[in-house]
Amino acid sequence: MTQRVYNFSAGPAVMPVPVLESIQRDMLALPGVGASILEISHRSGTFVAIAEAAEANLRKLLSISDDYAVLFLQGGSRLQFSMIPMNLLGKGQSADYILTGSWGNDALKEAKKEGETSVAWDGKSTNYDRLPKNGDLKLNPQAAYIHYTSNETIQGVQFKSEPEVGEVPLVCDASSEFLYKPLDVSKYGLLYACAQKNAGPSGVTVVIIRKDLLKRSDPNMPGYLNYQIHADNGSMWNTPPTFGIYVLKLVTDWLLNDVGGLDAMYQRNQDKAKLLYDVLDESNGFYAGHAQREDRSLMNVTFRLPSDELTDQFVGEAKKQSLTDLKGHRSVGGIRASIYNAMPLAGVEKLRDFMVEFKEKNAK
Ligand SMILES: *Cc1c(COP(=O)(O)O)cnc(C)c1O
């Protein structure tokens, strides 16, 4: 057996070990089926039951009401950057975008190709180290929707609660925090997340959409891009990402049965993040956090060291201790430790100890 490392990758990212073990155990033959999940029809009773269980688990974890459809799509969150305006932004309408980091900017870029947009707030002037207060938003009460990114994966800034936007449908890219804590879905028009950060493997993207918004989809748009068609067909208009849905079902089983639900998950996530932020705060500036304190992410901890040399040394020495994938994104620099749901406390404790030691050895 190869030794597993503590993998702090931003995505695809660490998965719960019991989930990997289930996949391994059942890969050649699903119990009672005699064939692999990779080999069975998406129309088979076995797969339909798996997809229904995945949806039921999500509905249970997030208390999603029947007013919402849950879709399992392909194309990642980036396809949602286009599908959202294609479906929801009518002619003559405009959509508002809150820009708190790289992903929000990328979402806006795609929306601009589809219609009118307006920037409700932009954190660029401070290199996306903070979030807006409700009073800071320039909102258009007639907007088709307002889009925001609840956790900016690259900068490591995360909203603690939804921005207040009145009656305008709130659209959220929750890719890198999905299922990290309980959520009031009724506040959203649409919430989406690719699975490969916090919910499963790459290849499946979850879209939770209020059913009244499905009416906005133009029947003449390409079928795959049309939310209404996916909702009418239970995400089986074409072959859905079967393996991804299967793993999502296992991850949500793990959240429900092993972790004990999202309140418990949230507590674990708070405890883990505190271990690292305490090191930052007690380092006399040796570890300089990118995000302002009140806007720090529980999922992606971003910070810089005094020099590029020390940063490289940090990454190299950490790797020797089986702490991997810690280099920050080039636009922010420094270090990024992604500590999603599946990162065990022991991994964060080991990183914390490494950081304390590294600082003692290298701080002047
Ligand atoms: C990773 C990520 C994306 C991009 O997802 P893809 O599946 O690669 O398209 C979009 N938004 C956020 C917040 C992300 O973390």
Image (cartoon, helix red, strand yellow):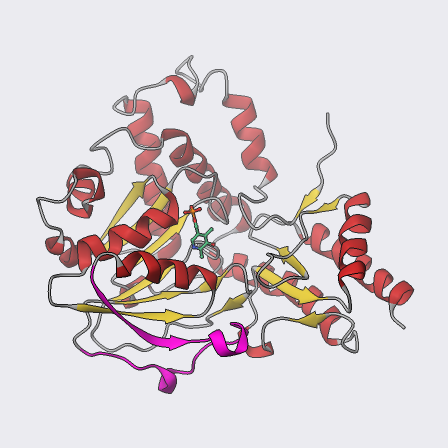
Q: Residue at x 55, y 66 (%)?
A: 297
Which quarter of the rendering shows the C terminus?
bottom right
Residue at the extreme left of the image, as rendered: 219
Residue situated in front as seen by the camera: 241 or 327: 327
Residue 254 at x, y percent in the picture? 51, 43
Residue 324 at x, y percent in the picture? 70, 46
Residue situated in front as seen by the camera: 279 or 310: 310
Residue 352 at x, y percent in the picture? 76, 60
Residue at the extreme top of the image, as rendered: 34
Q: Which residues are magenta?
A: 115-141
Q: Residue at x 47, y 72 (%)?
A: 160
With 282 as the anchor, is 139 left or right in this view? Answer: left
Which quarter of the rendering shows the N terminus?
top right
The vertical placement of 275 against 265, above or below, is: below
Q: Magenta stretch: residue 309 in it?
A: no
With 274 as the anchor, is 217 left or right in this view? Answer: left
The vertical placement of 75 against 273, above or below, is: above
- Asked where in the image residue 292 lies, by quadrant, the reply is bottom right
Residue 70 at x, y percent in the picture? 27, 47
With 331 as the anchor, is 84 left or right in this view? Answer: left
Q: Residue at x 43, y 59 (%)?
A: 103
Q: Magenta stretch: residue 137 in it?
A: yes
Residue situated in front as seen by the camera: 219 or 60: 219
